[in-house]
Image (cartoon, rainbow, N blue to C red):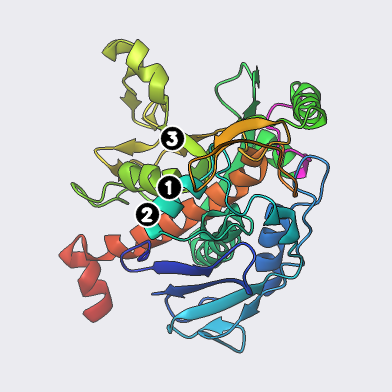
């Protein structure tokens, strides 16, 4: 429905088992180098195929259909398409009329009155491949300003890092980790937690940490389009996300003001409890976001549910599903954040007369 963004607008189309997933990104300034090798590497990070993810292996080869000429953005809408090549709809035939617990089957059916039972249709996380491609395009714009978005996993189920802050090296480690683990002392235990759940036909949740570096002071549009509120809104719009925290988040509710305030000296802020945002506006510190994913609802245990005729039935799923959806979800969070920051960068141009005079003289 509709689009995300004000000046940099993104919308997607497609279903899990349809012809493919596509998107349109409009508002990208002309003159940005479109690095297709980088875009491919972003999509590769999201892909399934490892023992910690879905065995569904999609080629995810994408086509850019418009808005790019001779490797550079033209200022026109960038249209793209990612074909679905590895669809196994027969895995879903037996549950054609049955609601899968904790899935959107029930709500989509009651809202729209029909049922695309093939892998969840539009409600499937398969749609997120479009967000990763669009987010990759946004990252190419952010790269021009030295803005960097990093992510990693802090918790898998009950196995969490006791650390609250992470270094640049930790994020570099997470990039190489099979489960994007930020704390290498917890990684083995976290991998075991995923594989134990998988062996039982079950799943686990996860928490991701997103860090945005080198953000210019001033991004965010109070009062109705604050940076933190839009980050929370769009990250909550991602499948399986149940909570989003900015900075110390929930922990700040347990503190006194004297503990929670970020004091300042001549070099800047001496702490970052606020997570880089004050009054809905970026304050120049790293922006820190924690995103919490529920366990993948597609599990292979027998579950009690109902069908579309309201009969009580037992369901045992087949198909190919992630034992921990938050792992690959962390990559999609980066993409969503990139789209927001790039949009806020464009919106901020009109904040001051002096900005406009730089353009128009």
Q: Please indicate whether residue 297 sits to the left or right of residue 60 in the image.
A: left
Could you tell me how far apart the alpha carbons at marks 1 and 3 are, in whole angstroms? 23 Å
User: As drawn, is 85 to the left or to the right of 105?
Assistant: right
Question: Is residue 151 highlighted in magenta?
Answer: no
In this picture, residue 208 sits left or right of residue 270: right
Report the quarter where the N terminus lies.
Answer: bottom left
Q: Earlier in the sequence, mark 1 or mark 3?
A: 1
Say which element carries label 2.
helix
Along the line of sight, the residue nearer the viewer: 251 or 189: 189
Q: Which mark is residue 111?
A: 2
Q: Secondary structure at mark 3?
A: strand
Residue 160 x/y as whole percent: 64, 20
Vertical side of 182 occupied by 123: above or below: below
Badge 3: how crowded within 10 Å, few (<14), some, or many (20+)? many
Residue name at image x 75 percent, y 63 percent: 58
Q: Nearer the viewer, residue 310 or 13?
A: 310
Residue 164 visible here: yes
Residue 244 — which label?
3
Where is the C terminus found, in terms of image quarters?
bottom left
User: Which mark sits nearer the N-terminus, 3 or 2?
Assistant: 2
- Residue at figure coordinates x 60%, y 19% from the top left: 163
Residue at image location 50% in from the left, 39% down from the top: 241
Q: Position of residue 302 (x, y in %)?
A: 70, 31
The residue segment tinted magenta is 176-184
Q: Is residue 172 above or below residue 271?
A: below
Residues at circles 2 and 1 in contact by the CB criterion of under 8 Å: yes
Circle 1 sits on which residue? 107
**302 vs 119, nearest the viewer:** 302
């Amino acid at each position: 429905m509709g689009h995300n963004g004000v000046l940099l607008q993104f919308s997607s189309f497609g279903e899990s088992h349809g012809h493919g997933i596509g998107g349109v990104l409009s508002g990208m300034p002309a003159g940005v180098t479109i690095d297709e090798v980088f875009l491919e590497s972003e999509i590769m990070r999201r892909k399934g195929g490892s023992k910690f993810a879905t065995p569904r292996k999609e080629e995810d080869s994408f086509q850019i259909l418009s808005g790019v000429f001779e490797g550079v953005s033209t200022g026109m809408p960038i249209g793209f398409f990612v074909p679905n090549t590895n669809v196994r709809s027969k895995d879903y035939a037996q549950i054609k009329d049955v609601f899968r617990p904790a899935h959107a089957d029930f709500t989509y059916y009651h809202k729209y009155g029909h049922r695309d039972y093939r892998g969840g249709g539009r409600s499937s996380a398969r749609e997120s491949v479009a967000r990763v491609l669009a987010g990759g395009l946004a990252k190419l714009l952010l790269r021009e300003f030295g803005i960097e978005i990093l992510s990693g996993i802090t918790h898998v189920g009950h196995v969490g890092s006791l650390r609250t802050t992470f270094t640049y090296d930790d994020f570099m480690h997470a990039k190489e980790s099979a489960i994007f683990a930020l704390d290498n002392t917890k990684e083995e235990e976290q991998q075991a937690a995923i594989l134990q759940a998988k062996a039982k036909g079950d799943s686990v949740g996860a928490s991701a940490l997103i860090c945005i570096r080198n953000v210019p002071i001033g991004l965010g549009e109070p009062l109705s389009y604050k940076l933190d509120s839009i980050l929370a809104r769009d990250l909550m719009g991602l499948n399986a996300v149940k909570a989003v925290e900015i900075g110390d988040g929930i922990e700040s509710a347990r503190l006194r003001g004297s503990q929670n305030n970020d004091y300042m000296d001549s070099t800047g802020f001496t702490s970052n409890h606020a997570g880089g945002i004050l009054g809905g506006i970026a304050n120049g510190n790293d922006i820190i976001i924690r995103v919490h994913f529920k366990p993948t609802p597609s599990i292979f245990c027998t579950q009690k549910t109902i069908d579309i005729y309201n009969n009580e039935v037992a369901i045992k799923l087949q198909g190919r599903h992630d034992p921990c959806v938050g792992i690959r979800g962390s990559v999609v969070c980066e993409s969503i954040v990139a789209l927001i920051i790039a949009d806020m960068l464009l919106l901020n141009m009109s904040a001051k007369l002096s900005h406009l005079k730089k353009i128009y003289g």
